[in-house]
Amino acid sequence: MAFFLYSILFCALFYLHFSVAHRAWRMIRGRESAELDMSYVRLEDYFGQSFRSKLANWMKTLQPAAGSTAGLRVFDKGNERIFVAGGAQYPAGRREREILVIEGDFTCGRDCEFEKELMVKGNCAIGEDTQLQALAVDGTLHVGQGSRVRRWVDAVKQLTIGQDAVVNSRATSRTSIELLPGAQALSLFAPEVFTEGRHENELQIEVAPPVIVQLPHPDRTTAAAHGYDPAKLYSMGANTYLYDGDLHLTAPLHLRAPFVVRGDFSCPKESLLEADVKAHGSAAIGAASVVKGNIVAGGDITLKPNTYFQGLLHAGGAMRLSRGVRGLRDKLPVAAYGAGVVTLESNVVVNGKVASAQRVVALSTPVAWLESTRIPAMRA
């Protein structure tokens, strides 16, 4: 009997350690958890869609507050207020401390400040040096020069981020995003992301280089004469190869199998990479090259002018996409990500996503390049 009582006491003390957790489990048992919304990682424009959805729900459930008129409806949501108006035009220096919904077009002058979210169902033009919290637009959106968005922006039609404007989080559009010189964002996603000089003349490509290095190499003598040591090549199986050391080729490369470079990697202009490349160091792709595989580098990645890529670029350091670079792929978006600063020169077009752990910034078009575009065609 004594042992039986001791066992009961022991089990009771043991249960006390987990009683709070058991009580919480009983309260939520059978319920569907809403704490994690997996759309957050699946949808690039999650913030814009989520805000639109919540706003629509608030408008259905809340009753207009006292003082509402036909031209301005006011809704109280806890400690916040929602102002709903038709088309509006704010003068320069205007301050808005409430959530603002505009059911038509909206413009504001320079140096305005919006402390809460702004929703525009028509077209929207934000004046220079304006401060915003977040912005969702169902039409076109122009963010003025020097403006700053503390969170995100989302547009259904074309989004233009003006010179030296800053978006501290995601910038998304269902149509296109134009990033003007000096503009910055943490992440850009649209069917077409492009920089200034979208329609500049492009460099002509030499379609038949006199010497081509093929890897894996059928001709060891030719490969060895152009910066490649066959003794450093090892087969990893599954048609994948490892190069033990830095690889800097001096003749155009035709890559036919996945390649791992235990060091830095570079190839000259007019190379063709049909497979993936992973470099432990940096990676530099020459001008007018075609990259059909993915490029992953532990350091920096540089794509020289007029390079075409159709996969993933992932840099553990900085990334630079030079003028004329194109990121295009049929039916699927491409992506370029850098842990450091991602720099976009003029006339860069990416159909998909450009993102950075620090910032994506567009550069202005150099004067020398503007002068050169007056020539009908030029050689790389």
Image (spheres, rainbow, N blue to C red):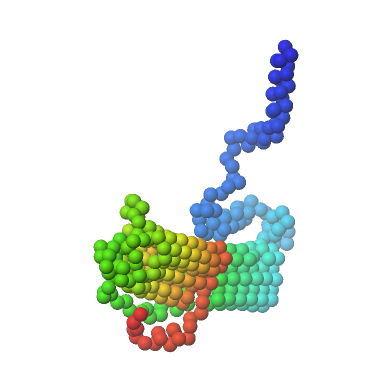
Q: How many marks?
A: 0
Screen quadrant of the N terminus = top right
Q: Nearer the viewer, residue 206 or 352?
A: 206
Residue occupying image coordinates x 38% and y 64%? 310
Residue occupying image coordinates x 33% and y 51%? 238
Q: Is residue 12 above or below residue 267?
A: above
Left or right, residue 340 beside residue 111: left
Q: Tell me where residue 106 sits by quadrant.
A: bottom right
Screen quadrant of the C terminus = bottom left
Left or right, residue 268 beside residue 2: left
Q: Is residue 204 above or below residue 219?
A: below
Residue 179, given in percent of the width and then of the height, sits at 51, 73
Q: Is residue 380 visible?
A: yes
Left or right, residue 110 beside residue 175: right
Q: Tell me where residue 127 sits by quadrant.
A: bottom right
Q: Can residue 288 be seen in this view?
A: no
Q: In this view, does 200 lie above or below 193?
A: below
Residue 373, given in percent of the width and then of the height, sits at 40, 84
Residue occupying image coordinates x 34% and y 85%? 376
Q: Which of 96 and 186 is in front in this view?
A: 186
Residue 29, given in percent of the width and then of the height, sits at 61, 34
Residue 86, given in percent of the width and then of the height, sits at 61, 67
Q: Tell me where residue 163 sits by quadrant.
A: bottom right
Looking at the image, the residue that sits furthest to the front is 231
Residue occupying image coordinates x 73% and y 16%? 5
